[in-house]
Amino acid sequence: MNLSYWEYQTWLSNIDYTIVGSGIVGLNTALHLKDRFPKANILILERGFLPNGASTKNAGFACFGSLSEILDDLNSHSESEIVDLVQKRVDGLKLLRNNLGDKAIDYQCLGGYELFVPRDLELFEQCASKLNDINTLLEPVFKKPVFSTRTNSFGFKNIHEPLIFNQFEGQINTGKMMEVLLHKVQNAGIRILNNITVEGFSEKNNSVEVKTDQFQFSTNKLMITTNGFAATLGISEVKPARAQVLITKPIKNLQIKGTFHLDKGYYYFRNIDDRILLGGGRNLDLKNEETTIMAQTELIQNKLEELLKSTILPNTKFKIDQRWSGIMGVGNQKKPILKQISENVYCGVRLGGMGVAIGSLVGRELAELV
């Protein structure tokens, strides 16, 4: 440990709560802990110079699941579990908006749409036939029908019509959301140390010994909120799921506004600053996309560009401006893992690609476990 006396005494001594990960869940956990225990000494450790999972790399969808995604989830979840999942996502979005404010995160409720390409005729027909049933299932949550149909007014090609519309879906600016959250945490007197990777931990008496790639220290309680990286700390129920994304350069007179889903939620796109942001495609190579390596592959990036050319912007010239990847945490179930692991260690992970929707709620519930 190459730390001075001053460094150790100032930053790494008498820590009440250490949170691993400065993403949506980690920051919200810290804020709610500070509300509960105002005098607590809280430390957040982050492996990247910015939140390094999906919190600053997602598409900024304020959503709770497309119609085809909900129908697909019914194959592995009961109806009551689906209603509970959707309710948590809705409650989480309300909490996010109330905590940060719509203006601060650039929240816009422009509605969400689901598209079906030609090979998905059977899926399209299934969704159309089950639309009213799902509206009935979700009526206790929304008190109004969620899904309806809309004409294709966006110029999309090679799709089945009509589009399926979700009146409650919105979008946010992910960067602004995280910037406001970070400011709130810092203003609350909570420390964040970046570029620190937690490699392991062990319980000792009434504390937890934490080993990082740069130093070791002791904390009273340890909270793991690393989501897609949770398996590296022994939480085997969570698998990493890489999400690849691209964004175009600004497009003159872009008429596409809203959030859009294809193929059971495996593809998604939206407008932002006169650009199209498009992500997804991990279903093309699920096994190899179970990785924490933030890179892009030719297979998936080519498919994303093909979708832009053939379906989303068929009559519009565009150029790709940026490409990136984020790491989600998934598993056999969509319900987050929120539990006490041992006497002084807790976790809130496996957000299943719904971090924007449920991250605030999971953070609050994790803080209440202590």
Image (cartoon, helix red, strand yellow):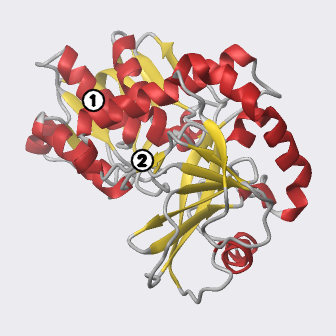
Mark before the other along the chain sequence, 1 or 2: 1
- Residue nearer the viewer, 152 or 322: 152
Classify 10 Å Cα crowding around label 2: few (below 14), some (14-19), many (20 and above): some
**Residue 9: % across, % down:** 11, 35
Q: Give residue 1's mark.
A: none
Q: Which residue is mark 2?
A: 109
Query: Residue at image x 17%, y 29%?
Result: 13
Q: Which residue is mark 1?
A: 30
Q: Is residue 122 above or below residue 129?
A: below
Q: What type is the residue that disc 1 sits on?
A: Ala
Camera-side mark, 1 or 2 = 2
Query: Residue at image x 27%, y 29%?
Result: 30
Residue 239 seen in render = no
Q: Where's the C terminus, which quadrant?
A: top left
Q: Quadrant of residue 121?
A: bottom right
Judge left or right: residue 72 versus residue 242. Answer: right
